[in-house]
Amino acid sequence: MIIYTNEGNPLGLQLLMLAKFAKRAVQVQLVNLNDAKYKDLLVLPTLELDTGLRLFSTAAIAKYLLGDEGQQRDEWLEWSTTLLAPALAHHMAVGHRADPNALPVLNGLVKKLDDCLRNAPFLAGDKLSAADIAIWCLLAPDGTLKGAQHVDNLRSWYDKIKALPEVQQVLGEQPLKELSFNALQQANRYGGLHHVPLRRSSSVDAGKLLAETAPTVADTVTDEEINAARAAFTYTKPKELAEARTVLPKAGERNVLITSALPYVNNVPHLGNIIGCVLSADIFARYSRSAGYNTLLICGTDEYGTATENKALAENMTPREICDKYFELHNSIYRWFGIGFDYFGRTTTQEQTDIVQEAFHDVYKAGYILTESVEQLLCQKCDRFLADRFVEGTCPHPGCGYEDARGDQCDKCGKLVNATELVRPRCKVCNSAPVLRSSDQLFLDLPKAEPQLREWVDRVEQGWTHNARVITRAWLREGLKPRCITRDLKWGIPVPHKNFEKKVFYVWFDAPFGYVSMTKRYTKEYLQWWQPAAGTNVELFQFMAKDNVPFHSVVWPSVLLAINKGNTLVSHIMATEYLNYEDGKFSKSRGIGVFGNDAQETGIPADVWRFYLASARPEGQDSSFSWNDLAARNNSELLNNLGNFVNRALVFCEKNFNSTVPQIVLNQDELVLLALINRELRGYINSLEKAKLRDGIRHLLAISRHGNGYMQTQQPWVLLKGNDEQKSRAATIIGLCANIACLLANLLFPYMPSTARNLFAQLNAKQTPLDASKPLATILLPAGHKIGKPSPLFTKLEQAFIDELKGKYGGTQETRAEEPQQAAELEAAVQAQSDKVRQLKASTKDKTVWQPEVNKLLELKKQLEAAQKTTPAAAAPAAATQSVQDLENAVQAQGEKVRQLKSSTKDKAVWQPEVNVLLALKKQLDAAKAAPAAAAPAAAVPTAAAPANVGADAGKIKALEDKIAQQGEKVRSLKASGDATIWKPELDVLLNLKKELAALTGAPAAGTQSKNKKKK
C-alpha cells in the first residue's frame, strides 16, 4: 500500500500510525498537488491499496485498516473531521486566513475532550482506537497544547499515547517538529480546511484553556535544545579536509566504497541517467568525504555487449571505435557536471578480462555452472545467431503489446523478455524474420545459490531503498532460475572453456566485475577494498536506476557467494525510480529529452543542473523534469532564498563592519535560531547518511530560510542607527548570519561544489569537516575574521529564456539538428552577445556577473556552427562578389588583430569571437577561389586535373576545411612560442592539407600562393 501525502501534513502522520497499529506495510510518497503527474489526486493524504483502489477519507481508511471498533469510535472520527480539524486550521492559519474567532471554538472542543477523558482512559472506552490516533495526530503539530491550562486529563492521555512503542517508531520516521497544520492548505484541490465554517456554538462557557496566540515553530524549541545550542556555539580551529593520494580502507575507521552503475557507451547520457547513477553517487561521495570517512568513488563505461555492436552498425564504425568515441563523450560530460570520480575507467581492459575469466573458473570449480542447449533465433540472411538486442518484436506480456520491444526487455512495460518469446520477431540488422535453432550455452546455477542468497538478503536488505527490496523479493518469491551467461557474439570477453572459445560472456556476468577491475586500475592494492582483511569493514554503496537492481542484488551477489573468497558484498543499494521528461519519457536510444551535451549548451551553470536534478531525484517514485520547474526552483530556492540570505549578510558585513566578522553576544533570539538550525542540520546529516539527497536539500534550504526570517525580523539596518546597545545587537546579528553562511557553504558543497567554492572565497574560508556524530552549529568565522568580496551567487532564469529552451529541446536530438536558425541571424546574435560580454568584463572583474553571458555566447556560437554546417553550398555564393585580393587582405588584417589580442590576454572569451570572424573570412576566401573553377574548370586549372574533381564530395571538402582551420590555429599558437623546430612540422601538415583541398576543389592551394607572393 502507498500513502500519498504532502510534506508536514498531520493527517499523513495519522495514516502512517494507523498502518503501524494495523501491522500493515506501507510506503509513504511525498507529493505536490501542483505536479501535473498527480492530477488525479484530489486530496491528501490518500491511501492506495495493492489493488489500485484509492481511499481518501481518513475515517474510511481507519475503518479499513482497524476494522469495526464500535459506534463510539465512528462518532469521534466524524467529530474530529468536521469540528476539530477545521477549528485547528482556522486557529493555526497565518496572514489573511487567520481567524480571531477560532480560539473560543477550539477551547470548547478541547474542554469536551478533557471531560470525556475524565471518565475513561481512551476516547471510545478502555481500549485505544483509531479515534485516539486520529485526534492525537491533530493535536500533535505546532505545539497546540503548549501553554494550555486545566486540561490535565487531556495532557495525561496525550503523553500516554506518545509513549507507545508504535507511536515512537512512527515519530522516528516523521518527527513532530516537521509537521505543520498549515500543510493542509496545500493538501486539497478545492481549498484547505480553513474554508470550512466554524461552529461557534460549541464554545459556550468553555473558558480559556489554550494559549491566546497560535504557537510558531520557535515555540516548539525545548530548553534542552537551547542549552545544547549554547554549549556547542564556540570556536575551535577546524581541521582541514585532506585526502590521501591513494585512498585505502583502514581498520577501525569507516570505509565507504561507492560505485555508480556503469553507463553503456551506446549513446549520450540523458538527465535521467545522470541523476539516477553518477550524480547521486558523486553527491553522496562528497558528503562522505566531508564527514571524514575513507571514501572511494569508482565508475566507468560498460563497453561490451550487443548494445555496442548495434551502435557500431548504426554508425558504420567498429565496436572499438564506438567505445573510444563514447568513452570520451561520457567522460567530458561528467567532468562538466563536476562529477569527482576517484577513477573513471572502462570494461575493455586486460584487467577486466583477467578478473572475469578468473571468476568464471572459480564459479565453475565450485559447481555453479550448467550447460544447456538453447533455442536461439538465427537470421539466415545475416548468417548469425541473434543476441537479444539484435531482435525486436511485439512484447509478449499481457496488456502491453508494444511493437518495438527488444529481445531482452520491453521499454514500455519495463518487464524482462526472452527474444524467443517476442511476437513477430525481426532481425534488427536486415529486418527479416529469424528462425529457431539450437545452440549450447553456459548457465549460472542460481537455484543452487538461492538458499545462501536468501540468508544474505535477509541480513542486509534494511540498508537498501524500498524499490530495491521490493524488486529483489519479487525475484525470490518467484524462485530463481538458471541464467545464461554466454552469448554468440564477437564483441566481448572470450569464454575460457572448451568448445565455448568462440562465445563471449553475457554483459551482465562481465559488467559488475568492472567495479573491481577499475579499482585495480586505480591501485594495485585493490583487494583491500574488494577482499578486505579481517578487522577492516568496508561498506559498499551502489547507485543505480531500478532496472539494474536484480543484477546487483541477485545475480552478481550469487556469483560472489559461489566464489566464496570473502568478497565485499553490497550493503546499501540506492536505486532510483525513473526521471521523466515533461509529459513523456527520456529515451537514450530514441534521443528524447535533455541530454548531457544539451545541458552544457543551454548556458545554465552545471551547479544549477546538479541542484535541480538532486531536488527532482526520483527517490520513492517517478518524477519529471520540467523547464518551468527548473526556472522556479532556481529563482525561488536558489536566488531568492539561499542567494538572497548569503548576499545580504556578507554585503552588510562588508559595508558596515569593514569586511570584518563582528563579535557575537547570544541572547534568546539567537539561541532559538541556533536550535532551529541544529534541527535542520541533524536532519541534513541523517538524510545524507541514508543517501536521501532530496531531503538533504530540504533541510539545507530550511536553514537559509530561518536565516532570512531572522535577519528580516531583527532588522540590523535599523539597529545600526540606534544607541550603542542596539549597534552591538546589529553586530551580533551580522556575525551570526556570516557564520550561518559559512555553515551553508559546507552543506552546499556536495550538491553545488563550484558554488560552494565561490562562497568560501567570498567568506575567505575553507571547507571544514562535518561531524556526523555531533550535528550542532559552531563558530566557523571568529570575531575579527576578514571576509572576501561578496557577489551574487545566482542569476535569474527569465521565462522568455526558458520558453526558448523548451522549444529548442522539445523534439529528438535528430530533429533539433534539422532546425537551426539562419546563419545570418545567428551571426548578428553572436556579435551582439560578444559586445555585451566585452562591456560586462570591462565594468567588473566579478566572474559571477559576466560568466552566464559568456555561456550564452558560447551556446550561440555552437548554434551558428550548426547552421553553417547545414546551409547548402549553393546558398553561399556571396563570397564571390568580393575579389580574392580583397578577401586575402581582410584575412591578413584579421589575422593580425587576432595575434595582437592573443598576445595581450589569455582570456579566450575576449579573442575567440575574432578568431571566429577570421575563420569565416577564410571560408569566404576559399569559396571565392573555388568559384571560378566551378564555373569554368578548364580555364582555371590544367585540363588533366579538372575532370577528376568536378564531382568532389561536399562532405570531404567540409571535413578538410575544418581540419585546415584547426591546424591553422595550432600553427599560430605554436608560432607564438618562437621555436621554429616546433611549429615548422605542423606548418608542413597545414600546407599538405591545403593541397588536398585544392586537389578536391580544383582551386590552387592558398598557402602555396601566399608563399610564392612573398618570394617575389
Image (spheres, helix red, strand yellow):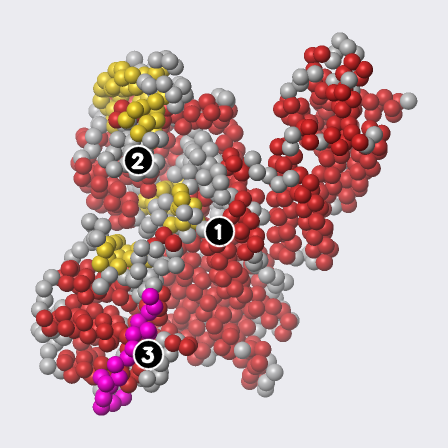
**Front residue of this view, candidates 192 and 760:** 192
**For mark 2, what is the residue?**
551
Q: Is residue 192 magenta?
A: yes
What is the C-alpha distance between the residues marked 2 and 3?
53 Å
Residue 765 seen by the camera: yes
Q: Is residue 949 magenta?
A: no
Q: Are marks 1 and 2 in contact (CB under 8 Å)?
A: no
The residue that appears at 65% across and 34% down in the rendered structure is 868
Residue 242 image position (x, y, % from top left): 50, 50
**For mark 3, what is the residue?**
91
Q: Looking at the image, tell me whether mark 2 or mark 3 is earlier in sequence order.
A: 3
Q: Is residue 533 left or right of residue 792?
A: left
The residue that appears at 22% across and 45% down in the rendered structure is 459
Q: Are marks 3 and 1 in contact (CB under 8 Å)?
A: no
In the rendered image, the quadrant that contains the C terminus is top right
Residue 293 seen by the camera: no
Secondary structure, mark 2, is helix
